[in-house]
Amino acid sequence: MTRSTYHILSKARSGKVFSNRIKPTISRFHICPPHTCIKTLPFLNDLAGSTPFSAMPSSVSNHYASLLKLCSQPNKQSHLKKLHCLILKTINPIDTFLYNTLIASYSNAALPEHARRVFDQIPQPNLFSRNAVLSAYSKSGCLSEMEQMFDSMPERDCVSWNSLVSGFAGHGSPKKAVEAYRAMLREAQAAPNRITFSTMLIFSSARSSSDLGRQIHCQIIKYGFERYVFVGSPLVDMYSKVGLLGEARQVFEWMEEKNLVVYNTMITGLLRCGMVEDSKQLFREMSERDSISWTTMVTGLTQNGLELEALGFFRDMRAQDVGIDQYTFGSVLTACGGLSALEQGKQVHAYIIRTHYDNNVFVGSALVDMYSKCRSVRLAELVFRRMAFKNIVSWTAMLVGYGQNGCSEEAMQIFCEMQRNGIEPDDFTLGSVISSCANLASLEEGAQFHCQALVSGLISFITVSNAIVTLYGKCGSIEDSHRLFNEMQIRDQVSWTALVSGYAQFGKAKETIELFEKMLIEGVNPDGITFIGVLSACSRAGLVEKGYSYFNSMVEDHGITPIADHYTCMIDLLSRAGRLKETEDFIKQMPCHPDAIGWATLLSSCRVHGNMELGKWAAENLLELDPQSPASYVLLSNMYAARGKWDEVAQLRRGMKDRRVRKEPGCSWIKYKNKVYIFSADDQSHPYLERIYAELEKLHLKMVEEGYKPDMSSVLHDVGEAEKMNMLSHHSEKLAIAFGLIFIPRELPIRVVKNLRVCGDCHNATKFISKIVDREILVRDAVRFHKFSNGVCSCGDFW
């Protein structure tokens, strides 16, 4: 340490460096006491030892300016304040240069109020001082203060105007941004420069405004900036983002000098527009490539559904020893998830650990997403729990992963845990947890999340509104679903599809078709999921010709290629209506064989209509596709049982036992006071068993008086009539309904969920019960919703 440095620092410690005439007021900056400054800034001693102070004030100012630049970051705000304290203690008076550096440092550290306080202390501020404060307001989004500062400036230059334009463009004032830019063009003393044009091009691409982008391009040519790389790169990006790839290519070709940034931008644009081969060709033409070039290819190929090629590029990238960062790992993990390539994903995970990226929150979130998509939700959970730091993306990835793997209850629990950790949900997170509620048909929790959406203002996001529309539809409150749909300011394809599917699941074919036709009139194009809803509605209402018409329209008018679900709907449409020969012909004309659900649908209809020959054909194909599926055994067994062929039934059951195929036991559940009560057929373990069976006995007597006759064909066991009667009266959904009648308040509907299709006898019995007790009963089975009221079901007895 030099003598002059030691002299200044020793005076700083003693407080003797200030004159008696002027002493700065430190307290209003809310910074630390002077005596702690040097101790809390250890890098000062190192820097002071390597770069000696001069006794001249200008040298001291330059030295402090260098230190200030080291602290000019949002994560070093405390260091910056302490260094400012030291400056106040060691220099008096402070020159304008150092004041300006302080303002700029506070601006870069996202402390606009402190920047303004420093500005107010300057005896004679210059243009740089005012621009520094203006920049601080611009970067922080303090738009009103920014405008006031700009209007008060006695002179302005290009930097002043750029700060104004950038502030408006970057903080939600597009109209003012364009007005400021136009005013700048009229200002003779402040011609736009490359910063101006780059800002406006980025603004245009963010707004997807091709018209504004073209105007900016014309002005770029007028001012002679068309060949500048700094302007050319955002120009290429703007044109590609608005879909004008021809113009993007022209700009790219016109540029005399192209650097890596321009090449990477052009490749990104080509991949964004699906021009994969062109992007590969341009990639091969590059004389040099960096990590961004490779990562761009991996990301673009993944986004275009070419995950295998993306993995190939990643392997080549490693072979060429190119540096891999968090974005590369994020893209390659997305590719693994898209392929459900668990083994490759594990290999990438191992490489992440070796390169010490396992503690990176971005990479950790991508790992959670990858394992979830590979159906390894427990591995995803393990990664999530080991993350040292989690952000909203991490929590959302885990929540969505639970939902994708059918763990809806865990999804709701992780959402509550997230909130307990002080993380507020965004629109995507809230929409995801509402979707999990919908999958559970959990109306109470769903209604609470609806309230949260209203209070937080997230209801204005279409993702949240669509999720709530779906929630009420899946919970049987189709009227509430439609009401919320009508309240939405903006509706997209998902909004319409959610409501169409809700009505279809309720079996309200007329309302479904009317809504679908209105959707077409509104100019909203349906997608494949919309048509699944419409076709299923036609199927459940027996509208065969209408269903055929919509199927043909989907292919011919809307250009949608049918998938397995569409063909299954058509199989259901024809076979449910008893047109089994047409169903067989339709299957034989299909370009592909039905999936397991399609064959099971046909087999179920063969059981209902008693077509043993076609049922065997369906069962054989189903067994070939999925030998461990119990559906083929159960449905074929039921067909034999209905005809009294008990030997064949026994043979099938032996086959199930030999192959270790287990039939899913039927159960029903009902929610009361935030607790789920589950019932199985002839349940003997429930704590309220006696009251439930007494209620059923009382109901049975009244039902018989009203004309109820048990449907013995629903009992597919070789037992006597009395035993059959007993088995029918103790089906799980009847037990759940009796529990609801005992405990659910009369003014509320009874909501029951069943994991299998409701049998014919239970369906008929529930109609009688709804009339006798004058209650609304909603039963959601594996196929659809049934709303029973006053002896009538919403499905019209066609399910």
Image: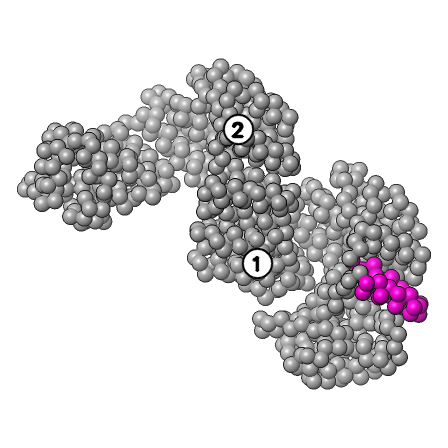
Location of residue 274 (image quadrant): top right
In front of the other: 709 or 214: 709
Q: Amino acid at mark 1?
A: Ala
Identify the residue under disc 1.
Answer: 411
Is 9 included in the stretch rendered in magenta?
A: no
Location of residue 241 (image quadrant): top right
In this rendering, does residue 513 appear at all?
A: no
- Stretch in magenta: 629-658
Query: Quick one: SS at disc 2?
Result: loop
Q: Amino acid at mark 2?
A: Gln
Q: Which colour style is shown?
A: one colour
Q: Residue at x 80, y 41 (%)?
A: 553
Where residue 489 appears, x then y in whole percent?
58, 49
Name the front one of labels 2 and 1. 2
Q: Is residue 561 left or right of residue 686?
A: right
Image quadrant holding the N terminus, namely: top left
Q: Residue at x 88, y 77 (%)?
A: 719
Q: Is residue 507 left or right of residue 399?
A: right
Q: Residue at x 57, y 58 (%)?
A: 411
Q: Is residue 207 left or right of residue 709?
A: left
In this rendering, does residue 733 appear at all?
A: yes
Where residue 327 appears, x then y in whole percent?
50, 38
Identify the residue under disc 2.
Answer: 320
Where residue 789 appears, x then y in whole percent?
74, 70
In front of the other: 359 or 283: 359
In front of the other: 533 or 98: 98
Is 642 included in the stretch rendered in magenta?
A: yes
Q: Is residue 15 above or below residue 790?
A: above
The label shown at residue 69 is none
